[in-house]
Amino acid sequence: MLKRLYDIALQFREYFLFGFFLAVSAILISSNDTGQIRTIRSLTVVVVGSLQEALNFIPQYFNLRQENAVLRELNLTLSEEVSRLREARLENLRLRNLLGFREKSPYGIISADIIGKTLQLFRNTITLNVGENDGVRVNMPLVNDEGLVGKIIATAPGYSIGQILLNKEMRVSAKIQRSRVDGIIRWDGGSQLAMQDVAKTLDVQAGDLVMTSEYSSLYPSGIKIGVVSATRQIPGSLFQAIDVTPGVDFTRLEEVFVITRVPDSSRVAIEQRPPE
């Protein structure tokens, strides 16, 4: 054992001697308090401090990367929470408006959520989560707190299809609230509705409120359709062109009410009877 230690010491004698002399030098320097040694100590402290300060960014760099990852994750979580709160607030406002409309409505109504809709076609429709089992029937009007939406055109036990005002086949008897001028509302494919069959001599102005009229056998009278946005004279025609901005924003439509009213069959029959 001793021989083995001796062989190892002999093999690495240069390293042992270097370590020994280095330790002796450190002891001598620390025990010596001359001006020259103090200068060397000061320079050593400055050099070591500078190196430490220069290399300090390495652990800071990795710490910052970790902190940034934590902050990004926290930011994502907060963004999702803000989105949920904003959605809850908007839903609360919608439901409050619908509840107020339901309490003031003179009609029997059924609440419905829109689970599908098309707004890019000439025959746009919406799909509702209520149907025959809920009392929904074909030709029942659709409304919300902003005004007339359309009517039911097809039903199934648990679902129904509604035809909205933005549909080429839609026709609604309408009246100007202020001047009591009558006309027919239809859609020609743009962002506006058109009120037709209004003589150019009749009083219609931009800003007039357009409502369903009592001449409709399908829709109750007095339901808001929209507001007149512009009127134009048509050269060579007895009628004027009237643009109407819909009261309902169909791009944001999410809930509707089905008015539980169907046309009077006897009235429809006599109005559709050909003249003798």
Image: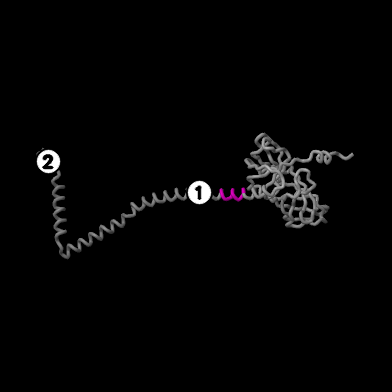
Q: Amino acid at mark 1?
A: Glu
* Residue beneath the point at 14% across and 52% down: 21
Image quarter in which the C terminus is found = top right
Q: Can the viewer see residue 92 in this picture?
A: yes
Nearest to the observer: residue 124 or residue 271:
271
Give amino acid for label 2: Leu
Q: Which residue is mark 1?
A: 81
- Name of the residue lying farthest toward the left: 3
Is the Cβ of the residue at disc 2 closer than 8 Å to that at disc 1? no
Say which quarter of the image contains residue 157: top right
Q: Residues within 10 Å of mark 2 (few under 14, many from 20)?
A: few
User: In terms of secondary structure, where does tag 1 sit?
Assistant: helix
**Tag 1 or tag 2, which sits nearer the N-term?**
2
Residue on which disc 2 sits: 5
Quadrant showing the N terminus = top left
Could you say where residue 88 lies in the image, as x and y percent from the top left?
Answer: 56, 48
Q: Position of residue 236 (x, y in %)?
A: 83, 53
- Choose between 130 and 105: the one closer to the eye: 105
Question: Residue 75 location, x and y as percent?
Answer: 46, 50
The local secondary structure at tag 2 comes to helix
Question: Residue most toward the right?
Answer: 276
Left or right for 159, reference 25? right
- Compute the Cα span from label 2 to label 1: 69 Å
Q: Residue at x 88, y 40 (%)?
A: 275
Check the image and tell me how it is coloured.
one colour
The residue segment tinted magenta is 88-95
Q: Is residue 3 above or below residue 62?
A: above
Residue 166 appears in the figure: no
